[in-house]
Image (cartoon, rainbow, N blue to C red):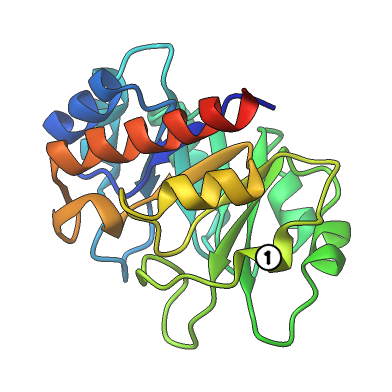
Amino acid sequence: MSYTRVKICGITQVEDARAAAAAGADAIGLVFYQRSPRYVEVDAAVEIARAVGPFVTTVALFVNPEPTLVEEVMRRVRPGLLQFHGDEERAFCERFERPWIKAIRMKPDGDPAQEVARFRGASGFLFDAWSPDAYGGTGITFDWKKVADLTGFPLILAGGLTPDNVGEAVQLLRPYAVDVSGGVERAPGLKDAVKVGRFIAAAKSAASDRAQ
């Protein structure tokens, strides 16, 4: 695979969504988890989703949500993809009849292949660093080699990525996509357009170099 896609997650403002799209982002992430500093209200999410246009995928991120919240977001925001980043079971993820990805937090003693098997039916798997205190957005990396041998599905890499290390990650894993939040911010939930541009350029340049 010669093309690595880029998702800019934790968008909270229309202008940041537009900047990400203009820089070449393939997707943006909207966080519907109130404990996150990147949480966005549904009303604001509607405007953000409209701002990026039809060819940038809007991903709605949830952490152990009530079904009614997911249903409201689907109805009003119309995301192209659902992302479950908590302790949801497969049956819950499937009940909304919308394409979904499952985040797997890389616990020190965890078995990522086993987790993948538990969630057959997912459109892809996002591998993130594990923290006992947070469900994501920690800025922490994990040992990328732990997922290097996983195949058969779109692999999305997250956790501590920045414009300075994303190229190395892409060269090593050749993932389907990379996902960044804090690594391109000037403050939690507020993106830095220069960092966003550098990140996307580094990820796609590394993928191109690997393909040659």
Q: Is residue 44 left or right of residue 107?
A: left
Three-letter code for the amino acid on which mark 1 is drawn: Lys
* Residue at the spot 44% in from the left edge and 25% down from the top edge: 26
Front residue (pair 160, 80): 160
Location of residue 140 with respect to 183 vertically, above or below: below
Rendered image quadrant of residue 92: bottom right
Residue 96, percent from left and from top: 67, 40
Mark 1 secondary-structure assignment: helix
Rendered image quadrant of residue 138: bottom left
Q: Please give the residue where the numbered disc 1 appears in the rendered image.
A: 145
Residue 149, percent from left and from top: 81, 56
Residue 52, percent from left and from top: 29, 20
Q: Quadrant of the C terminus?
A: top right
Front residue (pair 3, 137): 3
Front residue (pair 97, 122): 122
Location of residue 170 with respect to 80 vertically, above or below: below
Q: Is residue 7 left or right of residue 16?
A: right
Location of residue 158 with respect to 108 vertically, above or below: above
Please say whether residue 13 is visible from this viewpoint: no
Furthest residue to the front? 212
* Residue at the spot 55% in from the left edge and 61% down from the top edge: 85
